[in-house]
Every structure is written in C-alpha cells, then in structure tokens.
Amino acid sequence: MSRADQIAPTALGRLYRGQTAIDFYGRRRIGMYVAIVTLLVTVGSLFGQGISLGLDFEGGQAWDVPAGADFGVEEAEQVLSDNGVDVGGARIQLRESDSRSVIAVQIQVVDEATAASISQGFADASSATVDELNFEFTSSSWGADITRSAVRALVIFLIIVAIFISIRFEWRMAVSAIVAMANDVLFAVGVYSLFQFEITPATVIAFLTILGYSLYDTIVVFDRVQENEGKYASVRMPYPDIVNISMNQVLMRSINTSFSSLLPVVSLLLVGSGFLGAVSLREFALALLVGMISGIYSSIFIAAPLLAKLRSTTGRTSRRDLLTGDDLRAAVIGAGVSGRLASESPDARVAGSRKNERAENASLADEDAGSVRTRSTTDAIHQPAERILSHPPRPRKKKKRS
C-alpha cells in the first residue's frame, strides 16, 4: 500500500501524521490582515494611554503595608492625602497570598521628611510599627539606565540575528525573521499597554526571552525550506510551493514544541503566582505567555509567507500554477515528487525522471525505446508521465565499398 493510500480520514489524524495540506501562502493575506489589525490596536493603545512602568523605571517610593480589617485601599489613600500627595498619581493595590495580605503603595519621588511622615501614617493606620513596613526607594536615573540597557541589548540582538541568518541562510530569510520578531515585541508591549499591566525589569527580561522562542520556530521552518529547496533543485517548482510543503511538514513539530514550552509558563502563572503569591513570577510568566503565543503565530503566518513573497517571481506564478488540496498533500508526504518540471507553456509543465519512472511504472517498455512525456502540473507531482513506445530502431545502412 502506498503512502498516498494511508491518508488519515480525520483532520486531527492528518495533523498528527504530518499529512496536512494547508495552503499557508494562499491564506497569507488573512494572516497579515489579522497581524496588522492586532498591531494597530496594541500600538494605538501605546500612543493613547501609554504603558504602566514599574517603580524601577519611573523611580519613587513604595510601601508594603500589612492589610487588615482596619486598613485597606481607602485608608492608604487617606494617609497620602493627609501628607499632601496626589492620590491620582499613586498606585495602590491589594496583594494577597497564603501567608499574608499587603497594601502595595507606590508614589512619585518625595523628600525624606514627607516619606518619613507617610511611613508613620501607614504604621498608625494599620496598627503596626514602622519596622514592620517594607519600604523601597528607587532613583529615576537608575530606571533610565535600565531602559537604555534594555534597548541596547535588543538592538544588538537583532543585528546579530540578522547577520547570522544572512550567512547561514540568506538575507530574505533574515528580513522575514526580523519582521516576525518585531511583531512579537510590539504585540507583547501593546498587550501590556492595553490592559495596563505593570512593566518591571522581570518583564523586560521576558520580552528578550520570547525573541529566542520566536526565532527558534522561524529557524526550524527556514531550515526545512532550505532542505526542500535543495531536494527539488532539479524540479522547477515555484518557491511558494516549497514554503507550503515545508510548513506542512514541520507544523506538528512546531505545535509540539510550542505546547511543551507553554506548559511550564502556565504552571508559573497558576502555581507560582496564583497559589504561592509570587508576584515577580507573575510578571515574568505573563510576558512569556503573551510573547510565546505571538511567536507561534508570527512564525507560521508572517515569517514563512513573507519569505515566499520575497522569493517568488512577481507576475510569473499564478494561483492556478501552485499546488493545493490533494496535490499539495502528495508533495508533503513525498508521494512521487520527482523528475524535472519544464514549461511547454506558461500553464503547463513537463515532468518525470527516468529513475522514478522505472520504479513507479512496472509496465514500461525497454529503455532503448523512445519516450514521450506530456503531463500537466498535477500529473507531474503525483506520477511521472508514461513512456510511450515508438517504432523500433531503424537498422544502420551499410556503406558500399568502392
């Protein structure tokens, strides 16, 4: 039984066996439109309401005050108002865990006397001592240094990645990978802006980490594309077909890798942050989760289709010339892609190599017989053209001796 006869009857079965025939290139506009709309929403939020920077970036004073029946968010606001601090510019939230509950208060930089007065006010209102309060001060200049270092690290990373991919693969793949990673960063930062999640140094580290996950998925796809490009070197197959075949062949691998990577991140959110109350883990894991989901999408629907668009010859490859449906599936599972595709006309290709013809057609005539091979693109992919027996070879004429 041939591999083409063993196609799974269900979509899930075909996905598991690597027998999918998804036309990623044909649906590239849908993927691009979704990415563009998402970026417009997130970037619009960045310009509209900005991002919520943590204490390490903005600088200021922060207190963790024990919460109780007599002390909550309203009491904390009252203490700030009594000391002349604008409550509108302060961040006050209740943080709960299994061990204790605290009121986290963060304000802009104030003088030492005002900070001492606020600390005493919190202690009196919460029936605690000043030593029981967790007080933290961060200079705004230190936050600026962190921002510059993060931007510098991001730029250096992108430059190194572009050089590496250009040397290892080609510059078009480097452009596609950089566009996909830029999409991931903008999307992740935009989500933080849209929902006003606080950005901390742990969040920045997570943003840089997700670039590695996104790049890994993209490199896996590009490596298979390059491998298939060499495999079909003797077959003049359109580059979008090569990308489609490669994407379907590595689709299950990408899903398995992404799922196994997401499991520990979700565990950090549910166990580390939810049950153990580790806020720093939540900030790191949330950024990872958002970025990894974006990386999965960008490597499949942005990087690979963009590469196919950059490599395809403009105006020479129409949709009817590309593989779809069962034709694409046959190429994905390797069912008889062979020979050399040559064009008799813009809409036809000549196919077949003698090696595959001898293997797939047991009823061929002797090799010394002539052959005529005329098949369309679909026939060339599924099976080589049959060799047609011509007239027997004409005997040589003997030269007359003079």
Image (cartoon, helix red, strand yellow):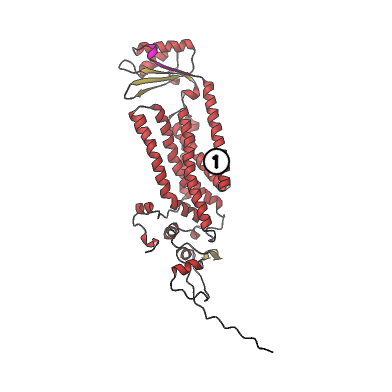
Does residue 302 appear in the picture of this structure? no
- Measured from the top left, where is residue 82 in percent x and y? 41, 11
Q: Is 196 within the magenta? A: no
Q: Residue type at mark 1?
A: Val
- Measured from the top left, where is residue 197 in percent x and y? 43, 29
Residue at 39 percent across and 42 percent down: it is 260
Quadrant of the drawing holding the C terminus = bottom right
* Residue 227 against residue 280 in the figure, above or below: below
* Residue 257 against residue 315 in the figure, above or below: above
Viewer-closest of 297 and 87? 297
The residue wearing badge 1 is: 161
From this viewpoint, which residue is outermost toward the right?
402
Viewer-closest of 368 and 386? 368
User: How many discs appear?
Assistant: 1
- Measured from the top left, where is residue 52 in percent x and y? 46, 27
Residue at 38 percent across and 33 percent down: it is 268
From this viewpoint, which residue is outermost toward the front?
401
**SS for dot 1:** helix
* Residue 370 against residue 265 in the figure, above or below: below
Does residue 1 appear in the picture of this structure? yes
* Residue 316 against residue 110 in the figure, above or below: below
Quadrant of the drawing holding the N terminus = bottom left
Q: Is 136 within the magenta? A: yes
From this viewpoint, which residue is outermost toward the bottom?
402
From this viewpoint, which residue is outermost toward the left?
69
Viewer-closest of 121 and 366? 366
Which span of residues is magenta-colored?
128-139
Callout 1: 10 Å neighbours few (<14), some, many (20+)?
Answer: some
Residue at 35 percent across and 57 percent down: it is 8
Residue at 32 percent across and 22 percent down: it is 99
